[in-house]
Image: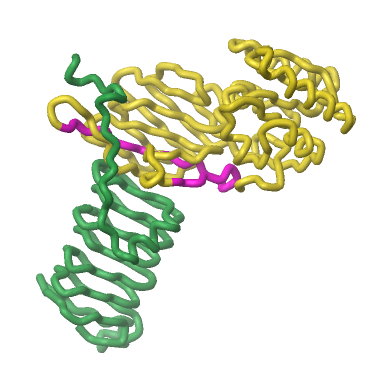
Amino acid sequence: MYVYLYDNFLRHKKFAPLIKAMEIRLTDYGIAGKILHLSNYIDTKPIIDEEIRRGAKTFVIVGDDKSFGHVLSRGATCECTFGFLPVGPDNTIADILGIPVGIEAVDVLAKRRKERLDIGWMNSRYFVSQLHVLPSKVEVTYDERFRVTSNGKMEVVVCNLQPFYWKKDKKDKEQHMVHPQDGKLEAFLRPLTKQGWWGYKYEEPSIFPFEEMEITGKEPFAVEADGKISKEVKVKIKLARNKIEMIVGRNRKF
Amino acid sequence: MIFQKSSSRNIVENTEELPMNNSVVQHIDEVDTVVGPSVNVEGDFASEGNIIVKGTVSGSVHTSKHLLVEPGAKIMANVKAGSAQIAGEVKGNVKVKESVELTSTARVVGDIETKTLVMEAGALLYGKVVMPGLETNEGRTGRSSRSVGRRSEEPVNGEGLI
């Protein structure tokens, strides 16, 4: 049995024709199911657990990158298969999973090509795509073996599914593809140094693949994981291998 | 404080093009770990993939693949690697399985153990070089020589003498 988890933004009438077309195609394939609308602050784990108890086996996230991260940050521990129907402009994860945005995503879902993906674990929750520590005075310890420091503030980005682009324009774009099944998370560190009287400048990034790392700061620092921001003094990040089973497309990037 | 505000408006992206030779570009394609120029690494620094060092590392460095020490980088540690190209400063013993290349800006204080050693003119080495393949009177394998502040002009390989 399929359960469809619709993000709240899909209530907007501009998405109505696409949603309707998707639902018709899902019915054609015989994989239509229960539809649940999620609000922004809802914890998805109890909802998924309840539906599993009722016999659901596949949960399909309908929305964008934020919806994807929101559902899986808590729901990753559930014993079920996840699918994704990307809708809307903010969809970068779908491309990595090989799922086209729009109605063609239904065809990928119907084919049920399943892969197990690695995800990251941060303090008490999971993150799927990216974790971002805004420039702060932090110290990073990798696998309890070596310590990385800088003289000033440092920005830390941990990537799992998504590559991170350090440079803004096309010429300076450095693309680091991070494979969700490579058995490592990848951390990018950029020290921020003072430039002149007013500005600051990002130094060249450092890149460390890791399985476990700890970010500590003397003062609380902001951490953004899959679009959710919190203030922390210590963040322990681990790799959860093959944690989620996901329906992916043939054109996936891993 | 207003002067310490790190808003995105005040931050300048570092877009300077860095001069790189072909060998560096070749290694960057398969890079796994990069120690940037403004970070310090302390402890047992180990990686399963290639390592590029542009900053400072102290403790020990270990990789089974390629190690690249860029000009301006400092390693104060014993190094073990599959192969290495050194253009920066290394204080510690270097044990490399395949080949070590010291470029003109390299400064190495410590012993080097490797199959092949290539030294560019201007490279500085203070330490013993050990290479497998030659039997000595002392009954141990390897040819060793001490090179003190020597500036070498010709490449040296495992078969030759320094």
Q: Is B147 on the left-hand or right-hand side of B69?
A: left
Q: Is B38 on the left-hand or right-hand side of A229?
A: left
Q: What residue span does the magenta drawing correspond to?
A: A175-195
Q: Quadrant of residue B161?
A: bottom left
Q: Tell me the quadrant of the picture where the N terminus of chain B can be found.
A: top left
Chain ID, green in image: B
Q: What colour has chain A?
A: yellow
Q: Nearer the viewer, residue A110 or B104?
A: A110
| Identity of the residue drawn at 70% across and 31% down | A102
Q: Quadrant of residue B160?
A: bottom left
Q: Is A192 on the left-hand or right-hand side of A253?
A: left
Q: Is residue A208 magenta?
A: no
Q: Tell me the quadrant of the picture where the C terminus of chain B can be found.
A: bottom left
Percent x, y for residue A142? 40, 40
Q: Is residue B57 visible?
A: no
B26 relative to A92, above or below: below
| Identity of the residue drawn at 20% across and 28% down | A199
| Identity of the residue drawn at 23% across and 79% down | B144
